Structure formats: C-alpha cells, structure tokens
Image (cartoon, helix red, strand yellow):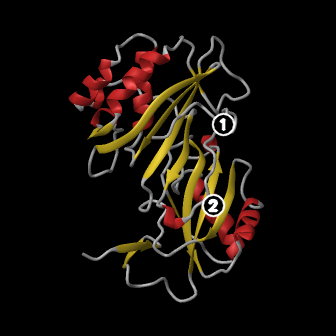
Amino acid sequence: MTDWIYTEGCMIPEDKHLPTGVTRYAAIVQYQGTDFCGFQRQKHSPSVQQELEQALSYVADCPVKTHCAGRTDTAVHASHQVIHFDTSAERSGYSWVQGANSQLPDSIALIWADKTTQDFHSRFSAGARTYRYVIDNSPTRPAIMAAAVTWVKKPLDISLMQDGCQYLLGEQDFSAFRGSGCQSNSPWRNVHRANVYRRGNLVIFEITANAFLLHMVRNIVGSLLDVGTGSKQPVWIEQLLAAADRCKSAATAAPDGLYLVAVDYPTKFDLPAVAKGPVFLPENLGITEE
C-alpha cells in the first residue's frame, strides 16, 4: 500500500518529493477568534487563514497557502494552532515570526516557525487535539474578558459534570453531539480524556480526542451545563450517546469560551512544547497526564 504526503491541497506518493527549491515550514499560531468566521478562508467574511496567508505571503514575497491542524469555528480561539506551508522562499524561523507578526492584526500572532520534513502535515500527522472551554461561573457578567469566556450565572456542580464526563471516554458514536452540516464521513471519535476543573469563578472543561466533529465540544458543553445546574443527572450523557440523536441533547454552548490548546504529533517531527492556554488560566490546573 502506498503512503502519501499532502502538499498544496494535493496528494503525492511518499517516494516523491516536494519540487526542487520548495521547503515545508511548520508554525504555531495563537489567535482570538472573536472577529473571524473561523480559521478557514471564506468568501463572505474575514478568516484567520486569510490574515495568515496575506502576512506570510508578504514575508515570502510570493503567494503562500496554509494548512491547519483544526478548522476552528466562528469566534473560537486558539492558544496552540499548528499550521504548515510550502514555499520556495528561504527564511529563518525568526524571520517568519517577526515578519508575519508585523503584518498581522493584534488578535493573531505566530509564536514559533521553522523548517520541517516533507512528510509533516499539520492535520493528517496529528495524533490528538485538546480543547478547553472556559466558563465564568459568577452572579454577575464579566466585562473585561467578555469575549474570552462564557458566562453562566447559575451555580455549577463540577462533581456532577465530572461524573458526566466519564461517559464520553473511549471510541464511540458522537452523533448526539454532532453539529448539522458536519461533513465528516463518520460520527465515531476516540476521546482520550475529559475533565472539569474549578479555579475560583472559572470552570474549565478540557477534552482530548483523536479528532472532533463539527461543534462537538460546544454541544458536549451545552449538555454538561444541564448536568452541572442539576437539570439532568450525569447518566443522561450516556443516554444521549446511546440514542445518537442530536435533537435530544442540549443547545450548543456559545463559542466565546472555547480554545484549541494543544495538538499532539509524533516525536520525530520535533515540534516545541507550548504551555496550554489561554494565558489567564493558572499554568497548572492539577491535570495528570496518563
């Protein structure tokens, strides 16, 4: 069976190479997604990808097309989005970072870039992705971080939410949390970890899986909030998964508090370790990696 690598939206056999003089670069990007229609370029609205490609093309002095680890949705943030791009322009990692950041809006920043191997693909080489959903669980709405968190006024019982999380683990059908319009061929995903933490007024839901369906995290959060407020029992999450019916689960949670915070790759690609975000969270949430 032939293995493939992906370049400029096309597949080429592994025993082939990028065109002579073309180098593949990887980069790590942070962004506040409030003003964007998501990562992916759209004709009708500003996107993170559009801004990145314009900035990188400026540095390269020729058109650059990017590929990402995860196509985050409208108003969703990232503290650790991974991209790659192919170009004939020879630049140091420092030059890519500094040059692109000089052209990017304040809400987007490259934090690392360097050459990588031609078999690296930001999406297809990734083994797992981690998202965090941050909730301000306080009696009054936040003002300073209004777009950075989702406000939930009712008190949340995180022990109940944590009990509900256990039903999410493993490989199973996540149709109950699949957004309409999802183009994935299969609703099956493998959730490696799912936990809820409280740090003061902040409640943080963290989930790691091999991949995610459209709106999957926000739909899970919506149902966990019903558990946390006592409207539903934790076993309801198991019942929803068994029913595989999106209409039976809760409303989709707002995008404001959602962050892509980690993407895992094989060690051979040697991408730098970056602390999970967002930056206003304490560095150690008490998470123990298995």
Which is nearer the eye, 38 or 159?
159
Q: Quadrant of the C terminus?
A: top left
Q: Is residue 71 above or below residue 63?
A: above
Give amino acid for label 1. Glu
Give me the residue at 42% from left, 55% from top.
127
Q: Is residue 105 left or right of residue 274?
A: right
Give me the residue at 42% from left, 10% from top.
230
Which is nearer the eye, 92 or 70?
92
The crowding category of the residue bearing disc 2, from other C-alpha atoms within 10 Å (few below 14, some 14 to 19, many at least 20), is many
Q: Which element carries disc 2, helix, strand or loop?
A: helix
Q: Is residue 153 above or below residue 28?
A: above
Q: Quadrant of the N terminus?
A: bottom left
Specify which label sits upstream in the sequence, 1 or 2.
Answer: 2
Which is nearer the eye, 216 or 203?
203
Q: Is residue 198 left or right of residue 227?
A: right
Q: Which element carries disc 1, helix, strand or loop?
A: loop
* Residue 218, horizontal then vertical, whole percent: 45, 33
Give me the residue at 53% from left, 89% from top.
20
Q: Is residue 221 left or right of residue 21?
A: left
* Residue 265, horizontal then vertical, whole percent: 48, 58
Q: Which residue is mark 1?
A: 283
Q: Is residue 14 left or right of residue 25?
A: left
Q: Which residue is mark 2?
A: 52
* Residue 94, horizontal then vertical, whole percent: 74, 67
